[in-house]
Amino acid sequence: MKLNERSLAFYATCDSPADNAGFLYKRGERHTAYHRRWFVLKGNMLFYFEERESREPVGVIVLEGCTVELCDSAEEFAFAIRFGGTKSRTYVLAAESQAAMESWVKSLSRASFDYMRLVVRELEKQLE
């Protein structure tokens, strides 16, 4: 499948159900201030927007090969999305409550195809 900005923007905002959606605070990579963004998780793609009503995402994080873990931060309810490799980016996010943080960590941890593959293998073993 060929992806471009237009097809990603369409997928991010189309009527297909989201696996999770809500406001999170995202720490900038260069300027380490936190910015409130609207996040939408669809499959293994985490889109983020300036505002809830925005029609185009500011960015997208493909969640393959990542780990999601709680982290120490000045912001309360913070967690990180980490990718393997020395030059890989770590995304630091913070939720507005403990319940929201737990929901996001759970959703993001289950978003990759690797996780789905493990679930399918486990179900196949149970069927045998």
Image: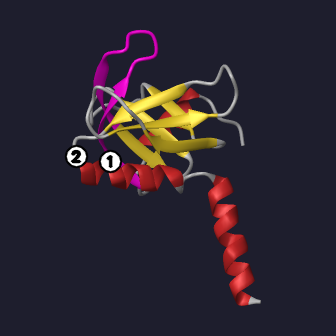
Q: CA distance from mark 2 to mark 1?
A: 6 Å
**Residue 51 position (above or below residue 17):** above
Magenta highlight range = 18-38
CA neighbours of label 2 inside 10 A, class few (<14), some (14 to 19), many (20+): few
Residue at x 66% of width, y 19% of height: 87
Q: Amino acid at mark 1?
A: Met
* Secondary structure of residue under mark 1: helix
Horizontal side of residue 106 vs 102, given as left or right: right
Can see residue 68? yes
For label 1, the residue is 101
**Residue 31 position (above or below residue 123):** above
> Based on the displayed image, in which of its 4 quarters is residue 119 positioned?
bottom right
Residue at x 73% of width, y 80% of height: 124
Name the quarter where the C terminus is drawn: bottom right
For label 2, the residue is 97
* Secondary structure of residue under mark 2: loop
Is residue 58 inside the magenta stretch?
Answer: no
CA neighbours of label 1 inside 10 A, class few (<14), some (14 to 19), many (20+): many
Q: Position of residue 99 (x, y in %)?
A: 26, 54
Is residue 22 inside the magenta stretch?
Answer: yes
Q: Position of residue 96 (x, y in %)?
A: 22, 41
Name the quarter where the N terminus is drawn: top right
Can see residue 7? no
Residue 98 or residue 20, whichever sits in front: 98
Q: Amino acid at mark 2?
A: Ser
